[in-house]
Image (cartoon, coloured by chain):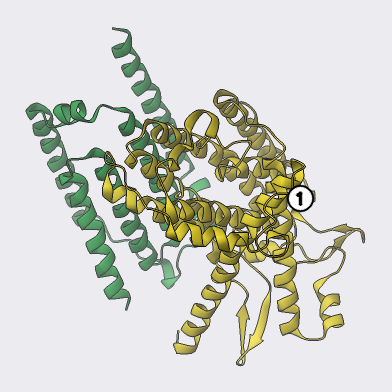
Chain colours: A yellow, B green
């Protein structure tokens, strides 16, 4: 690995990190305006055109607010917790394939920070770490509401990791690889001339499981039991103020973005346009580098659609009770996931054995 | 460069392991445990075993320690410290830990070092294939063994609650 390679790696990391970092203020705006739209009220519309500068105003407010540390708090862990939740949220980005590849400086550059051959395991492993920010943040606050929120979060995330993993394993079995890049590559083109070669048509049940579990993994309504403002004030981040609260919020939106990215890659063709094969797109555009850019745009558009779905669901579906939440995963999703995996394996065996 | 990294992560792992043992606060111990598992995972990456590293993070850091923390947060800390710092328990644990350490050391000295065949690193495919063909029997026996342990712990704990 020489200097140029390292420079390219650093540039790629920065580029994709900045892209996803900029999703956060946009999502704050989409969330607030979307909520207003669904609840039939104007929403924030004073700062800038359509209230578009509202996130900037929010950010300035976050920075200048008082930053209290409660007397009963465990100081060290209280300060570390927001970072503990933000770091895993950004680490997952490393394996998301934003596009195929471009040719620059005489070498091929993958539009992905790292093409790991165990990418899906990496996503699951890093995804399971975000819980520590919530757990330690809630405990270190020295507040019973926060502790309850943290305990709820840990049991919820641990439980929903299982259907999430089972759904991902279904996709892995179908594609025969753990690499997200290879999975995305396999979804180019059409079946029978009219059906996009997307994972959702191979693993419809798997997608449904992944989709439901992702709401619980990101602590979003209808599964936002860790923060339930009606019973736990705000759960694990009750005691946090100023930018530390801002970091919890950033982590939430970054988690949403990465899990949407994983869903797009596993089930919705990654960077591929539906009905248009990459080869055909290349012929229209004429340049591999431009195609790479278009692919990134397509990928981000698909992610944006998923983000809007997350907002839409948050403001339409009411919250579940905690025992219902647990019954959904242990009683329904996990058995369904196991059956899905068995059926997948059976069909694959029937269609021609393991590769 | 990888030597420096190995040194750094080794120091991290060992330092945090000491933190686990010497910390008076059980939650802080758990926090150090997570960090030391991370250091261990990084060491696995450095010896070209990324699969092991990811599994280490996924199972130990991501699931088992979460349950530790979960349980510890619900327990009265002062009472817990009273129990775990009792003389008999410390003595028994010490003797057991030293014997386990000696057994491991002996096993390490007397077993041949695993050498990758023809310099090729095991991929995910070869690991899974050997797990599900050559080592299927021990693998299954181990899982049943785990199940027995879980049920056994459950039965023991239940008896105490009822009594």
B97 lies above or below A32: above
Counting labels gives 1
User: For mark 1, what is the residue?
Assistant: A200
Residue sitting at the far top:
B163
- Image x and y of residue A328, in percent: 62, 29
Neighbour class for label 1 at 10 Å: few (<14), some, many (≥20)? some
Residue A222 appears anywhere in the view: yes
Which residue does the image show at 33% across and 8% down from the upper left?
B162
The residue lying at 70 percent from left, 35 percent from top is A317
Front in this rendered view, residue A32 or B154: A32
Element under disc 1: helix
Q: Residue furthest bottom?
A: A106
Q: In the drawing, does residue A204 fall left or right of residue A109? A: right
Q: Residue B152: image x %, image y %?
A: 35, 21
Relative side of B84 to A333, left or right: left
Q: Is residue B47 left or right of residue A120?
A: left
Q: Position of A4 compared to A276: left or right?
A: left
Within the image, what quadrant is residue A219 found in?
Answer: top right
Residue at the far front in the pictured view: A46
Q: Position of residue B87 (x, y in %)?
A: 7, 29
Q: Quadrant of the C terminus of chain B?
A: top left
Q: Residue at x 25, y 44 (%)?
A: B28
Question: The disc numbered 1 marks a residue on which chain?
Answer: A
Can residue A117 be seen at all in this image of the molecule? no
Q: Give the camera-side residue of A197 and A318.
A: A318
Please state, as top left, top right, bottom left or bottom right, where the N terminus of chain B lies in the image. Answer: bottom left
Q: Position of residue A99 (x, y in %)?
A: 68, 71
Identity of the residue drawn at 80% across and 73% down: A278
């Amino acid at each position: 690995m020489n200097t140029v390679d390292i420079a390219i790696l650093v540039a790629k990391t920065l580029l994709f990190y900045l892209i996803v970092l900029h999703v956060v203020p946009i999502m704050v705006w989409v969330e607030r305006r979307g909520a207003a739209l669904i609840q039939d009220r104007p929403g924030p519309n004073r700062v800038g055109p359509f209230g578009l500068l509202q996130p900037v105003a929010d950010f300035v407010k976050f920075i200048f607010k008082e930053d209290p540390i409660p007397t009963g708090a465990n100081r060290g862990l209280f300060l570390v917790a927001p970072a503990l939740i933000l770091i895993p949220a950004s680490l997952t980005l490393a394996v998301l394939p934003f596009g195929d590849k471009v040719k620059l400086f005489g070498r091929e550059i993958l539009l992905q920070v790292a093409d790991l051959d165990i990418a899906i395991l990496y996503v699951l492993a890093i995804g399971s770490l975000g819980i520590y920010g919530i757990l330690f943040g809630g405990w270190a606050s020295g507040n019973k509401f926060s502790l309850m929120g943290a305990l709820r979060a840990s049991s919820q995330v641990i439980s929903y990791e299982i259907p999430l993993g089972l759904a991902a394993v279904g996709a892995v079995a179908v594609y025969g690889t753990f690499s997200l890049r290879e999975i995305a590559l396999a979804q180019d083109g059409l079946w029978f001339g009219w059906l996009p070669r997307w994972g959702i048509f191979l693993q419809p049940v798997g997608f449904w499981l992944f989709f439901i579990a992702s709401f619980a993994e990101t602590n979003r309504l209808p599964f936002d039991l860790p923060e339930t403002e009606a019973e736990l004030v705000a759960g694990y981040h009750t005691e946090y103020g100023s930018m530390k609260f801002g970091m919890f919020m950033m982590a939430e939106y970054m988690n949403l973005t990465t899990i949407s990215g994983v869903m797009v890659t596993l089930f919705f063709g990654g960077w591929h346009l539906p009905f248009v094969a990459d080869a055909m797109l290349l012929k229209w555009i004429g340049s591999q580098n431009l195609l790479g850019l278009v692919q990134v745009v397509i990928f981000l558009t698909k992610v944006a659609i998923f983000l809007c779905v997350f907002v839409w669901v948050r403001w339409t579906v009411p919250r579940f009770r905690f025992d219902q939440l647990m019954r959904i995963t242990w009683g329904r999703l996990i058995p369904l996931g196991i059956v899905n995996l068995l059926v997948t394996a059976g069909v694959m065996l029937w269609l021609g054995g393991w590769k | 460069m990888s030597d420096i990294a190995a040194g750094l992560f080794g120091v991290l792992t060992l330092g945090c392991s000491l933190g686990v043992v010497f910390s008076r606060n059980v939650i802080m111990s758990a926090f150090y445990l997570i960090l030391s598992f991370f250091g261990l995972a990084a060491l696995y990456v450095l010896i070209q075993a990324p699969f092991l590293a990811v599994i280490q993070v996924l199972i130990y850091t991501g699931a088992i320690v979460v349950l530790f923390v979960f349980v510890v947060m619900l327990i009265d800390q002062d009472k817990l410290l009273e129990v775990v710092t009792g003389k008999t328990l410390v003595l028994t644990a010490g003797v057991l830990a030293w014997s386990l350490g000696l057994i491991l050391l002996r096993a390490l000295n007397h077993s041949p070092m695993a050498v990758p065949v023809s310099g090729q690193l095991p991929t995910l495919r070869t690991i899974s294939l050997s797990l599900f063909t050559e080592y299927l029997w021990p693998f299954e026996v181990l899982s049943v063994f785990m199940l027995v342990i879980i049920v056994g712990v459950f039965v023991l704990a239940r008896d105490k609650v009822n009594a």
